[in-house]
């Protein structure tokens, strides 16, 4: 089976949750991972730091690099890219996982939160892609993977949380455009989204707490799907909007029970997917 041994991944938001799970899964192959995240010291409400993520990566068999970075700022992203290339010799894969969430209607959305959503989700994704692409273009099997949903013009996804939807769809529009822009260069650009909600700090703190977590899957489920995509040939796998369940079924995985937070509980359906 193809693996990521010796590949270098630049993963945003990798200090916890889905980003860390993708990093650890790649580390099991012997990959190098730049942990690109803001949390340098323990946060009172959020688990993990760039340093604990690096420790988990190295325990799994990979090489980690802590890059304390706020992806809203170009100079910080450029410094993280430069440090990654200097340390590992290049960048093979970019995972745009970092994301902010604030669910509110138009009248209840503070503009400070609106700006944060778009600065991290859309601008941050675009910026990290822009600065990594010169290095990806020199890789043998380059991939960009955005953790963003399939594009849909159904009004129901815009009605209740317009600002958040616009920001996540902005990430998906980067997939749509960059896949075509860099197709001839052989850089794959794809999106991955979970079928069921994933048990992360955002879900626990903002979307219902333990009652919601019971109906979620573990971050490792998305990580396995991401791994399956990142080892595919870049020239024949680009411009797609994947859902994690579908990816794993394509890989022959049919038993998902072990990935449930509470086996036996019904699973919810994530945002932006038809029930």
Image (cartoon, rainbow, N blue to C red):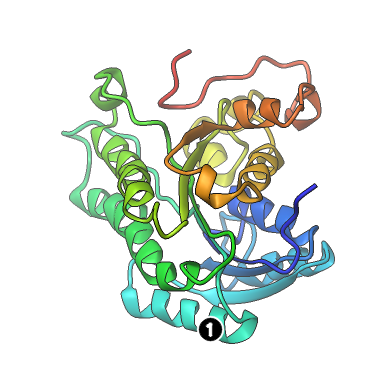
Examine the rendering and report whether any part of residue 274 can be seen.
yes
Q: Whole-percent x and y of residue 191? A: 47, 41
Examine the rendering and report whether any part of residue 70 can be seen.
no
For the residue pair 116 and 124, the one nearer the viewer reads as 124
Left or right: where 217 falls relative to 164: right
Mark 1 neighbour density, 10 Å: few (under 14) some (14–19) many (20 or more): some
Q: Whole-percent x and y of residue 268? A: 57, 19
Residue to which mark 1 is pinned? 83
Q: How many marks?
A: 1
Outermost residue toward the bottom? Answer: 86
Outermost residue toward the left? Answer: 107
Q: Whole-percent x and y of residue 77? A: 41, 74
Q: Whole-percent x and y of residue 185? A: 42, 60
- The quarter holding residue 247 reads top right
Relative to 196, is 95 above or below?
A: below
- The quarter holding residue 249 reads top right
Relative to 126, is 212 above or below?
A: above
Give the residue at x 54% y 60%.
142
Left or right: where 114 falls relative to 149: left
Left or right: where 254 falls relative to 83: right
For the residue pair 216 and 204, the one nearer the viewer reads as 216
Relative to 251, is 154 above or below?
A: above
Give the residue at x 34% y 35%.
103
Give the residue at x 48% y 83%.
82
For the residue pair 115 and 140, the one nearer the viewer reads as 140
Give the residue at x 31% y 24%.
157
As helix, strand or loop, the secondary structure at mark 1 comes to helix
């Amino acid at each position: 089976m193809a693996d990521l041994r010796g590949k270098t991944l630049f993963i945003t938001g990798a200090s916890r949750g889905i980003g860390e799970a993708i990093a650890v899964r790649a580390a099991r192959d012997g990959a190098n991972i730049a942990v690109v995240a803001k949390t340098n010291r323990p946060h009172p409400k959020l688990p993990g730091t760039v340093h604990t993520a690096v420790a988990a990566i190295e325990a799994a068999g990979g090489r980690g690099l802590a890059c304390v970075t706020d992806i809203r700022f170009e100079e910080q992203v450029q410094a993280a890219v430069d440090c990654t290339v200097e340390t590992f010799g290049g960048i093979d894969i970019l995972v745009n996982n970092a994301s902010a969430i604030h669910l509110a209607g138009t009248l209840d959305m503070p503009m400070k939160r609106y700006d944060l959503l778009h600065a991290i989700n859309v601008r941050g994704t675009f910026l990290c892609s822009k600065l990594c692409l010169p290095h990806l273009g020199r890789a043998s099997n380059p991939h960009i993977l955005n953790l963003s949903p399939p594009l849909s013009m159904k009004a129901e996804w815009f009605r209740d949380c317009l600002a958040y939807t616009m920001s996540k769809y902005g990430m998906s529009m980067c997939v749509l455009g960059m896949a075509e822009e860099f197709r001839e260069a052989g850089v794959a650009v794809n999106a991955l989204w979970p079928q069921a909600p994933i048990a992360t700090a955002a879900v626990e703190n903002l979307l219902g707490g333990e009652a919601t977590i019971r109906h979620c899957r573990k971050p490792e489920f998305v990580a396995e799907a991401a791994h399956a995509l990142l080892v595919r040939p870049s020239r024949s796998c680009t411009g797609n909007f994947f859902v994690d369940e579908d990816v794993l079924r394509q890989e022959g995985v049919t038993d998902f029970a072990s990935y449930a937070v509470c086996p036996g509980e019904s699973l919810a359906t994530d945002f932006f997917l038809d029930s």
